[in-house]
Amino acid sequence: MVLFVLAIIISIVVGVTLLDEIWPKMKEMAIIAVGGRGKQRVPCITFNKVDIVEALKWAKKKRTLGLGLTNGSYYDNGSAFQCVIADEGMRHMGPITSLAVNISDNILYSASVDKTVKVWRISDLKCIENIPAHSEPINAIVVADDGILYTASDDATIRVWRRNFCRGEWPHSLMVTLPAKCSPVKTLTLTADGGVLYGGCTDGYVHYWLKGWLSGQLQYGGALQGHTHAVMCLASVSNYVISGSADSSSRVWSREQDGQHVCLAVLVGHRGPIRCVTAFLGHSGEEAEDGCTICTGSLDGVLKVWRVTRTKSASGRYVKNDYFELDEGV
């Protein structure tokens, strides 16, 4: 009995000693994902300074699916499971508001209310740069095919960034700051060729900038008026621009050959602010029709699909604009 009690005391002392040794490492651990078969959920943990062999033994004993290391390696215990590695020290200090991908450069951008944009290398998910982009929270980012990054913020500006491959620690440099008429910019969209940049603001305006063919510089083109509340989302397809607003409506604009914009339709039917919108080109019927299909999602929990058409005459002029709701679902 005495030996049994002595063994328990020794175990407690050894356990406390081991805890003192392990605790600094435990603070470096970060549970970053969970996985399992069926409804079983087992934590997947990253280790910074733990011997891999011992860690795998620990994982097998605890029936953990696998171990991911902060260097990007992943060790599996025999289960099909994908673990995403994230360096806890590189996390945003606030909610992430927008993402953009530059596939050609193997780059993922993330923007946050912490006023920064982080640059992630897709191949190993390593944060390679932190850009203190704005003085206020960042609401939207978009990247063009030529690698130019656009960031929109509550500081009522859009900033344009270029990636310089010859530079070391700070490869992204600020090219120009575009003022948005003293109104916070909530959303961005680019035309497919990168020639026109649109920014939706809290004052209900959609401001746009045109890129010069020779200089490549962005020049203010004007504003699209019509919404009575903040513009919360934008989409662009071909020569169409679609805006969704907190006034529960969406507007469809057409960019004409002379550069002017015409409002083709006001889509009304939601009972809450329009939070997201997307569009794609489509044709129907035997008439010479031009138009697009639009999907709108609202805070009312309803998804609506719309069809906007323009009918041409024999001379090639548009003679009729029409729109109708195709379907909806909850």
Image (cartoon, grey):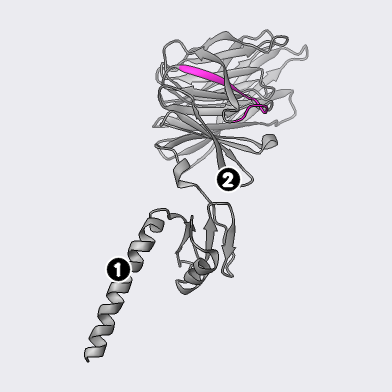
The quadrant of the image that shows the C terminus is: top left
Name the residue at 50% across, 48% down. 86
Q: Mark 1 points at which residue?
A: 16
Measured Cα–Cα span from mark 1 to mark 2: 36 Å
Is 97 or 84 nearer to us in this picture? 84
Instruction: Count every numbered label the image shows and give the total.
Output: 2
Name the residue at 54% across, 64% down. 52
**Left or right: 138 in relation to 126:** left
Is 56 or 196 nearer to us in this picture? 56
**Left or right: 290 in relation to 13:** right
Q: Which of marks 1 and 2 is nearer the N terminus?
A: 1
Q: What residue type is labelled 2?
A: Leu
**Crowding near the residue tagged with mark 1, few <14, some 14–19, many ≥20 C-alpha atoms within 10 Å:** few
Q: Give the range drawn in magenta.
A: 157-168
Helix, strand or loop status at disc 2: loop
In the rendered structure, does residue 160 fall within the stretch colored magenta? Answer: yes
With respect to residue 260, does 160 lie above or below? Answer: below
Helix, strand or loop status at disc 1: helix
The quadrant of the image that shows the N terminus is: bottom left
- Residue 125, which numbered label? 2
**Crowding near the residue tagged with mark 2, few <14, some 14–19, many ≥20 C-alpha atoms within 10 Å:** some
With respect to residue 60, does 163 lie above or below? Answer: above
Name the residue at 45% across, 46% down. 88
